[in-house]
Image (tube, helix red, strand yellow):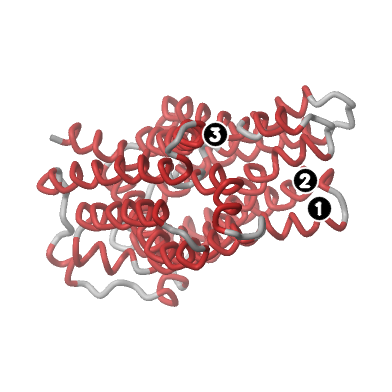
Amino acid sequence: MASLLLAVIYLAFVSLGLPDSLLGSAWPVMRVELGAPVSAMGLVTMIISAGTIVSSLASDFLTRKLGTGLVTAVSVLMTAGAMLGFSFARAFWVLCLIAVPYGLGAGAVDAALNNYVALHYKARHMSWLHCFWGVGALVSPFIMGACLAGPAGWEGGYRVTSYIQFGLTALIVLSLPLWVRPAAQDAQRTPLTVPQTMRLKGVPFLLVAFFAYSTVEATSMYWASSYFAEYRGAGAEIAAMLGSLFYIGITVGRFVSGFVSERLGDRRLIRIGCAVIAAGLVLLALPLKTYAVSIAGFVVVGIGCAPVYPAIIHSTPFNFGTKNSQSVIGVEMAAAYVGTTFMPPLFGIFAQYVSIAWLPLWVGVFLVLLAVMAEGCNRAVDRFHAGKVHLPPAA
């Protein structure tokens, strides 16, 4: 039964990735039909991100009251409904309205599933599950592209995605008896508030680390195509294709890291990931006329990012205790969404007025912040554990 539930969770992670790259793929056509400017997509994504932050912070309360399985089912149902609603939107303001339940559903399921896997499964599954998120993010542009090439249009792309999500909702509902519910005493315990969570030793360091990591990932992901086109001299079509290099690197990297995650341990994986990202940034920054080395650079940065997110999540129950892990993961997700939402646009302003050539240095600054804050969290947690009870140091 545990294997059957794990298969359902893998599919749920694919579903998490499906909507993430859908709007960007459809927007060039959507905005024309809806009469919206190019920049208007930023408002939609910010509304979605605001919803994910709110629901991430509420994930501890919701999970204790409803259980992870039901929270997952309701959240996927909300995103499925939002995808279907997008397909019927005929005005930009309708997209903004539907983006609210879209974001609320995405944040709750992300935090709930990550905590459940961290508590009940080994580290390799955390890496592979996030690899499956990458599969979903890679597949959805092809779904949208196929629909845009035919009579279905962007509306059809959203409808197909919503049907997949509705099917997954039904599967999750059928699997509800397999999910482990919180123990009675845990379900009745008052969830930690955000200030209480912030007072746990090491949490402030961790939140800054997660914010920095999300900035590294999102900036590399969103600005890769522009970097190739505007700085490395690639044609527009080639640059668009090269923009997928980061997705490829992070997806392959998470698949591979799953095989070594339990041997290396979460802390070593984070350190190795940071070192690999640094190597990739060096390749990006090399002052060469050809962009062949930059191609390798973005792949290497993606590979380096691959183990960091899963390792931070998987180490949370060890660092802060199983009773506190859902609260901590909720604020971790919120910090991650803040970085993802605000820092890439900020780099866009920087690139507009300075130069996009500074992308490797910009990402490098946040990489250093990530490494310093991650080590600060480790030291704070180790001191706390040493003062309470002897625990073996995490690898």
Residue at the outermost left position: 177
Q: Quadrant of the N terminus?
A: top left
C-alpha gap between disc 3 and disc 1: 24 Å
Q: In this rendered view, identify the residue nearer to me: 365 or 30.
A: 30
Where residue 317 sits in the image (x, y, percent)? 35, 53
Q: Residue at x 47, y 62 (%)?
A: 95
* Towards the viewer: 300 or 84: 84
Which corner quadrant of the image does residue 70 belong to? bottom left
Question: Is disc 1 placed on a helix, strand or loop?
Answer: helix
328 relative to 350 in the view: left or right: left
Q: Amino acid at mark 3?
A: Ile
The residue under the point 83% across, 33% down is 232
Residue 163 appears anywhere in the view = yes
* Nearer to the camera, 188 or 9: 9
Comes first in the chain, label 3 or label 1: 3
Q: Residue 250's mark?
A: 3
Label 3 residue SS: helix
Q: Residue at x 15, y 43 (%)?
A: 175
Vertical placement of residue 306 versus 63, above or below: above
Label at residue 359: 2
In the rendered image, residue 30, in percent from the top left (x then y), is placed at 55, 50
Residue type, numbered disc 1: Ala
| Camera-nearest residue between 168 and 190 | 168
The residue labelled by disc 1 is 351
Q: Dots 3 and 1: beta carbons under 8 Å?
A: no
Q: Position of residue 25 (x, y in %)?
A: 55, 42
Q: Residues within 10 Å of mark 1 (few under 14, many from 20)?
A: some
- Callouts 2 and 3 close, C-beta under 8 Å: no
Contact, CB < 8 Å: mark 2 with mark 1?
yes
- Disc 2 from disc 3: Cα separation: 18 Å
Question: What amino acid is found at the position of numbered circle 2 in the picture?
Answer: Leu
Cα–Cα span, label 2 and label 1 = 8 Å
